[in-house]
Amino acid sequence: MTIQSRPRDTDRKTRIQLSVYDRTKFLMLFALTFFVLAWASMADNPLLSFSDAVSKTANEKVWLIVLVGIEIIRQVHFALAEILAPYHGFWLKYFAFVDRLLNKLSDWNRFRLGRVIKWLVFVAMLSIVLGAIYKETPVRALFLAPKALFSALPMIGQILFAVIFVVIQFAAIFWFLSRGGVDTYFPDDIRTRFSDVWGQDHVLNRIRENLLFLETPELIEKHGGYVPGGILLWGPPGTGKTLMAESMAGETGKPFVFVDPGAFTNMFMGVGVLKVKGLFRKLRKLALRYGGVVVFFDEADSLGNRGISQGAMHSADSNATVFGTPCNGGNYLSDPGKSLITNEALNRSKFVMGGAAGGGGGGSGTLQALLTELSGLKKPRGFLNRVVRRALGMRPKSPPKYRILVVMATNMPEALDEALLRPGRIDRMYRVGYPSKAGRIRTYEGYLNKVSHSLTTEEVDKLATITPYATGAIIKDTINEALIMAIRNGRTSITWTDVIKAKQLKDLGPAEDVEYIERERHAVAVHEACHGVMAHLVRQHMAIDLATIEKGSDYLGMVASIPPDDQFTRWRTEYEADILVSVASLAGERMFFDGDNSSGVSGDLESATTIASFMEGHWGMGSTISSHASNRRNEVGAPGGGRGKDDGTKDLRMALGDRIENNLANLLSRAEEILKENKFKVLALAHALETHKTISGDDVIAVMNGEKGPLVDGRPYSIQSNLDAIWNYHLAAVVAHQKHERPNLPIPVFEAS
Amino acid sequence: MRAVKSRVALSAVAGVLVLALTSCSQSQIYATNKLTGTYVAIPNGWNKIEKPALDKAESKSTAPGAAEKLASVLWQEAYTTSPSVTPTQVLSLQAPEGAAVYVRVRNLNFEESNSISYNNLRNLLVPITTWLEDPANANPKFVLIDDYERVEKVARGVRTIYTFEDPSGVSSTIDQTALLSDDHSRIYILIVRAKTKFYNKNVDELLAIGDSFTVRGDK
């Protein structure tokens, strides 16, 4: 059985039948008016009988009879249109012609023309009423009105004062509170252009497309489409989202409205709603006047959401528990690994904090008001349009097309409300991610062109290579720091050394200039050397950037690695290498310190465990296939062995934690074997670190291969006698460690060959 | 419920239409002056004599103070059963053909307002009080039919109905109401007159005119 829909106007052959009320309301109104006038006549003349009053009114108020006549004709017209399809079709055709004529005017001109006509009608009605009151001609009465108004001013003033005194306390405060937070820029106010945004060409091209549609909407509308009305720019901080918006403001020929992140944060409930409504009223006006408008919400996460706890968002700092350990264990991971751990920490916090009150940046109702304004019911606007036209049995005019392009930027897209992101509100979401190598080169060149420097093209290329996750903001800051270093050294031109030092300063923070006691220095050096050797030997997807045992603000030492290429997929062997590098510190400390190990491995183990957990439970890199995330969500429990394993070796329903522990134990054993085979290399690297404190990745390679590096000459580490001296020093340090005393041997010093 | 509403609406509409289309003429003529708040109901079909015509006729009077009195008239109108009655005839003591109604509102000057009394109001046209005090020298056909006080919202005075022989020797009946405003600044006069024979024949209709005389005062 097919469902019968209510026919559309275009499909309807006759007019919709009016209700009895609609059919008679004006006649009833006229009847009421008639009797009121008759009553007024009787009040005016005490001798007048009711029947004479009715006769008098009928004779004197001819206009009322005329109106009754017109209304009767109108109702007859409607009744015919309800019954006779050809009759209705004729009038429909006629009015469609009138509408077509009206639509030839632009929306803005129609708006202005409508406003003028409304005012003229109002003035005409006023003059007629005044004429009746003053018993003058309407025109003359209109000129008398100001005088009467002036004489009535004191009384009006008193009444108004009484009313305003009460209302002003709220209205004025709310009015003032609903101001601010919104800045409007007109074309050419901003000079930033797309050419000033570097390294994000793929996003810029899309945005340029959006602007093109905004400026020439007929390109898409004439083909039945619509202009995408919302863009979300999301991505890590400093990647140029705001700069991109600024360049949009510079490029577009439309007004650009900038909404402050704190615009909707208010002391009183309801002010946010007023602000949203005020903002969109302004946007509609600008859109009509200029044919379009762009509105930019910076830090859109401040708008809040209705579901996720804000507390969970703030707990993002909890990732410091991973990266803030003495060993700075997280730095042995590649950045995807780091972000994984961060997200995991976030999810943990969410789990703990779940159920807390949903955050709403703007306060109660603000977000909902924004959602409604972005894509709510498109209501006909204006009192005359909505009420008067409907009262006359006419359909209100549809609202004009307000071409408003909403652009939002955030680095916390997960904090945005789901409803905000649906198509129709936000049609396009662009990730403004870390720039590619080519983008970084372009960005470095852009900022270097603004200063004096001596960097070659090859050096800029290398710089882009060793800063894989540098954003525009980081690059700008690095170049500026390099310039400060150059100026501090009495120069105005930046050199390669300045840039590298600036990068280290930004990566590691300023060294604390703390001197370790000998046995602790050696322990830290061995710890970092284990990471370094393991990274050099097993982690082919990352290159060592630097190794240091200089104490920073939240670490004792570190080996930092970078991906030499832009890589978007990760493999099991790579994650295993990550874990091997992480657990190398534990394996090495136990091996070199007679089974003892420090608390400095805690961060390494946390990182390794997290990676191992995901490998086992999420990425299909363990002994089972099913996803732990799915199992947990569906509450089906974790599997034991898995089809891929032989029945003989399958442990019955082994817990996920046990499997992770087994995997880590296996990798720890492998790490021990690798380090045992390379124990002299570990001690050689530890010696280089103790001697130079901070060395580059090339120096690490030089030590490993017994070559001359940029800072460290690795050739002495290929001589057995030197290695024996290093071994003896290590033994003395181990004894000193066990007895808590100074080593009885000094650190060996090798002459450069 | 819906049917009841429909019936009410349709009844209202029908009522308006009936009233609008059938109520075309009034049952009486309402002589009204809103400025002074004076009202009189005259039977339909009488002929109206407008103020300018009366003013013109009165301006020909040579009596002392006539011009001053005319200048102080706020409103005056006359209605007659016969269209041939002239303004001059309305203002003269001689009985007109048929019946005539004359209504007048006039401001009093300082002397008049200080000296006017109910007897002055009675003696408006003929010396009624003198004739009553000295019947030997009174009009031969003078008969006082009625005399009583009328109190209105802002004025009070006397209504006197009497018969006398007019200058042409015809018996004439006059129903005169003269009211003085409470502040003695204004006089309201209504005179209904006819030959006695005509008056007696139409006494109810003519008395109703006098009864309808209403003074509400300035708005």
Image (cartoon, rainbow, N blue to C red):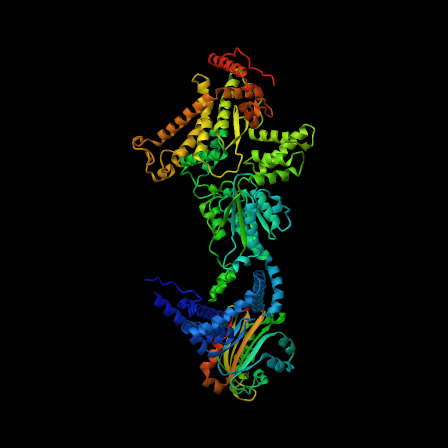
Count of numbered badges drawn on the protein: 0
* Residue drawn at 53 percent across, 56 percent down: A402
In the rendered image of this protein, does residue A230 appear above or below residue A114? above
* Residue drawn at 59 percent across, 50 percent down: A256
**Is A690 left or right of A625, judged from the image as shown?**
right
**Is B127 left or right of A572, judged from the image as shown?**
right
Rendering coords of residue A459 (x, y %)? 62, 34
In the rendered image of this protein, does residue B77 appear above or below residue A658? below
Rendering coords of residue B140 (x, y %)? 52, 86
In the rendered image of this protein, does residue A300 appear above or below residue A494? below
In which quadrant is the N terminus of chain A drawn? Answer: bottom left
Residue farthest toward the bottom in the current orientation of the protein: B169
Rendering coords of residue B134 (x, y %)? 54, 80
* Residue A50 shows in this picture: no
In the rendered image of this protein, does residue B102 appear above or below residue A559? below
Q: Nearer the viewer, residue A148 or B16?
A: B16
Rendering coords of residue A333 (x, y %)? 48, 31
**Residue B119 occupies quadrant:** bottom right
Q: Nearer the viewer, residue A548 or A85?
A: A548
In which quadrant is the C terminus of chain A drawn? Answer: top right
**Residue A13 occupies quadrant:** bottom left
Q: Nearer the viewer, residue A525 or A77?
A: A525
**Is A732 left or right of A249, judged from the image as shown?**
left
Residue farthest toward the top in the current orientation of the protein: A744
* Residue A19 shows in this picture: yes
